[in-house]
Amino acid sequence: MSTTQETPDAAGLAPALESSIPAHLLREDRHPKHRPGTYTPPYPSFSARFGGEADSVVMAMFGVQRADGGVPGLGEDTPAEILASLQGDAEEFAGLASAPDGPGHRDRSRFVDAAGYATELHIAYWADPAAFRRWLDATGRSWLDPAHTGPGHGRFLELVTPSLERVETIFSSVLEPEGVANVGVGLSGQIEEHGYWGSMRDRLPFGQDDELWPSGETLHEASGETRTVVLPHNACLIRSGQDITDTEQRERAMYMADVEPALRAGMDFLRDDGGGIGCHDNRYMVIVDEEGRPTDRTFGMSWWRSMAHLEEWAASHPTHVAIFGAAMRHLGGMGPDARLRLYHEVTVPAAGEQRFVYIGCHGRTGMLRVTAAG
């Protein structure tokens, strides 16, 4: 989906398309659904680019969960004392992030999880894995000190360190980078692999000659209050977001009346019942500013057993059909005046490129739901 209109060049021709996959990762024997040069997407989209010397990135989700007196079931009306505690946690993480070798970009986001715990994720990105390792050893590990946790207060780190061959991104606009694109060197020109079912797989460099089937078992270790999980090879992570910051009154009202309810219903389904279709966990989050105030940027983040499970939900499940239909009605109704911005990033890490560490967290937190202990 996109809200950016294609602008002809000086000769009145549409801009030339390029592959979402950067040139140095393209393989001659790849077989995308559409032969390059034979398909014109219905609207423009773009992908993140990284420096030629970069071969992997770091996506580190530093989480904190809090419940009122240790009792779940907070709902959306989080008490002021919980918000104050989360603000203290956020200020602590901001201090850690400002240390040498800290992240190149970070987002602070908030949601209420399946057990009713108010939760914040500080999602930090590095383009240099060596810098991340130095920072983690010198500074970041203090986030997971069990002394910081207690009844109704857990912390965790969900760490993904994929090679760039295992990451794909798509953006509807070049105006504002999101997520991992913030540690790249910019965005591509208009790409050709989008606007059709299967384009997500065609954008993933590693998928050029690999079926990306999952293999192996979920590993789980427990030591006191610390539990560590490693998912099987080729599990799939998606972060998919929307930004209504620049929308005017009419478009914003349309979005909140039609698109957002369908999106929230789909996100709640994946959170509560997604296990039956291969979704391990889903979070529908709002990005908050440094003072903890909600912004106009939201996103869903979910882990799937495989990319195939994600594709099947996206292609045919009623909840995603409703989301897609609402979005198309919105964009069709607004036409070139649309200011809604959309994006996603998808990662299919190898088994050695992901790890989840939970300290004092309840058993329905993140990937603990996948384990027998969850």
Image (tube, grey):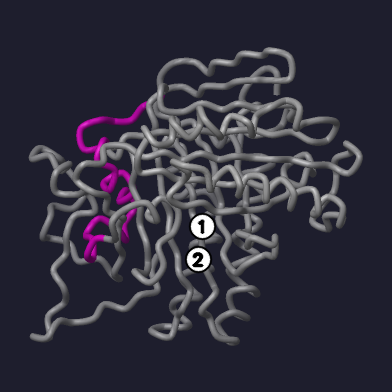
Q: Is residue 136 above or below residue 225?
A: below
Report the disc number at residue 250.
none
Return the residue nearer the eye: 220 or 235: 220
User: Residue 292, position in %: x, y?
Assistant: 70, 60
Q: Tell me the residue at 51%/39% (across/down).
A: 60
Q: Is residue 299 above or below residue 357?
A: below
Left or right of 178? Residue 158 is right
Amino acid type assigned to the residue bearing label 2 in the image:
Gly
Which image quarter: residue 80?
A: bottom right
Amino acid type assigned to the residue bearing label 1 in the image:
Val
Query: Is the C terminus in the top left, top right, bottom left or bottom right quadrant?
Result: top right
Secondary structure character of the magenta stretch overall: loop
Left or right of 342? Residue 153 is right
Report the disc number at residue 321.
1
Return the residue nearer the eye: 193 or 228: 228
Q: Is 335 within the magenta?
A: no
Q: Is residue 48 above or below residue 17?
A: above
SS at mark 1 in the image: helix
User: Residue 126, position in %: x, y?
Assistant: 41, 43
SS at mark 2 in the image: helix
Q: Which residues are magenta?
A: 188-214
Q: Given the current orientation, which residue lies at the most extreme front position?
A: 100
Left or right of 224? Residue 244 is left
Q: Which residue position is annotated with label 2?
A: 325
Q: Tell me the residue at 41%/83% (across/down).
A: 335
